[in-house]
Amino acid sequence: MRKLMTIAAAAAAFVAGSAAAQTEITVQYAIPDIFKEVQEEIAKQFMAANPTIKVKFTQPTKEYEDATQQVLRNAVTGQLPDVTFQGLNRQRILADRNIAIPLDSFIAAEKDWATKGYDGALLTLGQVKGKQYGMGFSLSTPIIYFNADLVKKAGGDPDKFPATWDGIFALAKKINDPANKVRGFHYDWDITGNWMWQSLVFSNGGTMLSADEKKVAFDGPPGQKAITTLGRMVSDGTMGDISQATALQDFVAGRLGIWAHSTSRLGGVTKQTQGVFALRTARFPLGAGADSRLPAGGNVAMMLAKDPAKQKAAWEYIKFATGPVGATIMVKGTGYFPANALPAKDPKMLGEFYAANPNHQVAISQLPSMTAWYAFPGENGLKITDVIKDHLQTVVNGSGKPDDVLKKMTADTQALLPK
């Protein structure tokens, strides 16, 4: 009996010791309707490979702005998550306020870092003022989704989809069929962070602010073209004042012919439209100038942990989530492409996937045109995003004329910039 008690005590001590040795990290992410299954699968595989680290998720936030606001509140209460997945344009505010931890020393301590798939150009998307604060997790560009069946019915050729907004609007008018509750076109202009507004401005060769970030720059010719195009989407392109959720449902149900959105939805939309209609994708229209660019969407993994033990565990998780295994899970579960170069080259990971899914190749073909998703400076950075969104809404609902809206939007944004 005494021997059995000794064995039992030893076993209990072993279990207690194992539990004590386990480090728990909390992880925050946004947009659960895209990322919930992906994040949970990554955590599951990570914990299986790293039994001394436990991953616990905080309540996901609806959008990237919500995730940033939550971190700012948590910084005040001292309840920061150890790892956060933030929109590419929201790294700056966490770096400027010294909430995020620079990752340069962790990278420097890695052996053979150059062989781990983190391309130098893609790494720059996670840098703020020359320091590495984020590791790219998911990347996207705006693309055009279209219902090939409706395009054919309207007399269009899915293999020769229009490359200009004029051509898209003309095709949308032919597709538009109110009697059968079919709309020709929709542009999800209100995607988080003014991303689709930036897409219109950048694609025409413009910028948000001047080089010194003291003056609004989207009021120049590129911005004028952008706001005019947005207005024409309503007047010429058959676009209505509907929500992103409604546009998505209309498209997957076959009631919307052409839909401009992020590649982020491609995985889900592909599944939802199987057996409903032939889904195709096309490149986002670019202006003729050499400066035409598209903002990189998506998010990065950032470290907020202050405790050294949690920092070590958080770094292991960040590497796993943004590395080949995590990137493969993410791509197959969404429409994003990875910020790690290894999976696409490996047939067992994503090589065969991309070969079998040409719709995913469209976004990758736009990589040469990719630029940073702009983050406005100063304490009012988040507020400026909301102000721009409110002004754009008046163009979409018809209550404001594009030229007048651009002037008001410029003045209101200028007033919120750091003095």
Image: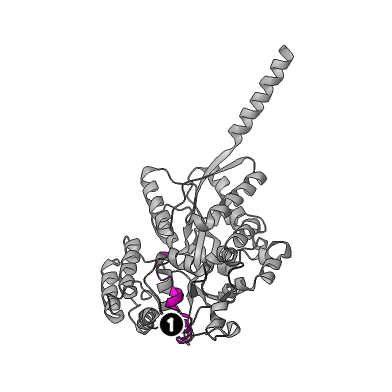
Residue 196 visible somewhere in the drawing: yes
* SS class, disc 1: loop
Horizontal and vertical percent position of residue 99: 42, 52
Question: Residue lying farthest top?
Answer: 1
- Point out the stretch of residues depicted in magenta: 166-192
Q: Which of 80 and 280 is in front in this view?
A: 280
User: Residue 220: image x %, image y %?
Assistant: 34, 82
Quadrant assignment for the N terminus: top right
Q: Mark 1 points at which residue?
A: 204
As drawn, the residue found furthest toward the front would be: 179
Tell me where residue 187 sits by quadrant: bottom left
Question: From the viewer's perspective, is residue 183 above or below residue 155?
Answer: above
Mark 1 nearby-residue class (10 Å; few <14, some 14–19, many ≥20): many
Which image quadrant for residue 121?
bottom right
> Residue 338 location, x and y as percent?
59, 64
| Left or right position of 302 against 49 | left
Name the image quarter holding residue 116.
bottom right
Colouring chosen for the image of the structure = one colour
Q: In this view, does 349 lie above or below 317?
A: below
Q: What is the number of callouts on the image? A: 1
Dot 1 amino acid type = Asn
Q: Position of residue 172 (x, y in %)?
A: 46, 81
Residue 419 visible, this angle: no
The quarter of the picture where the C terminus appears is bottom left
Q: Pick the residue in front: 419 or 157.
A: 157
Residue under the image location 50 percent in, 61 percent down: 299
